[in-house]
Amino acid sequence: MKEQDLIDLGFTTIEVIGEEGEEDFYYYELEISEDCDLLSCSHDEVQNGRWFVEFGHNLEFRFYSKREVETLIDVLKSNIYE
């Protein structure tokens, strides 16, 4: 997935200012609900221009396809229990 795909899907850029001696970085976030976020890798983790998305900080699932992330967003948003 490309960076523009994240933007097209409604992800927001999160900029992190590095502490002394650390570099600044950014990643993307999409809040599905109060307790569920999708997070991209940080810009310095991108390999060959390919970004991936994870459930919050759960490292068990990674999604590299815009189509899969779009489907995931639709499924999650349509099944929010309020």
Image (cartoon, rainbow, N blue to C red):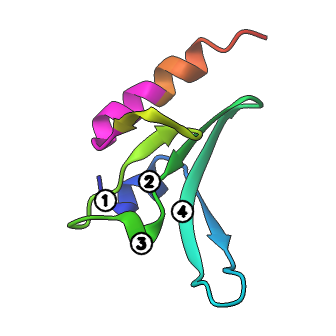
Is residue 3 depicted above or below 20 in this figure? above
Residue at the far front in the pictured view:
21
Tell me how far mark 3 sits from mark 4, CA to CA.
Answer: 9 Å
Residue type pointed to by label 3: Asp
Q: Is residue 64 left or right of residue 34?
A: left
Q: Which residue is the site of mark 4?
A: 27
Span of residues in magenta: 63-72
On the image, the x and y values in percent for residue 65 come to: 27, 41
Disc number lying in front (3 or 4) = 3
The part of the image, by quadrant, that contains residue 80 is top right
Q: Residues within 10 Å of mark 4 (few under 14, many from 20)?
A: many
Q: Which residue is the site of mark 1?
A: 2
Disc number lying in front (1 or 3) = 3
Q: Residues within 10 Å of mark 2 (few under 14, many from 20)?
A: many
- Predominant SS of the magenta segment: helix
Residue at x-position 55% and y-position 52%: 11
Residue at x-position 66% and y-position 72%: 16
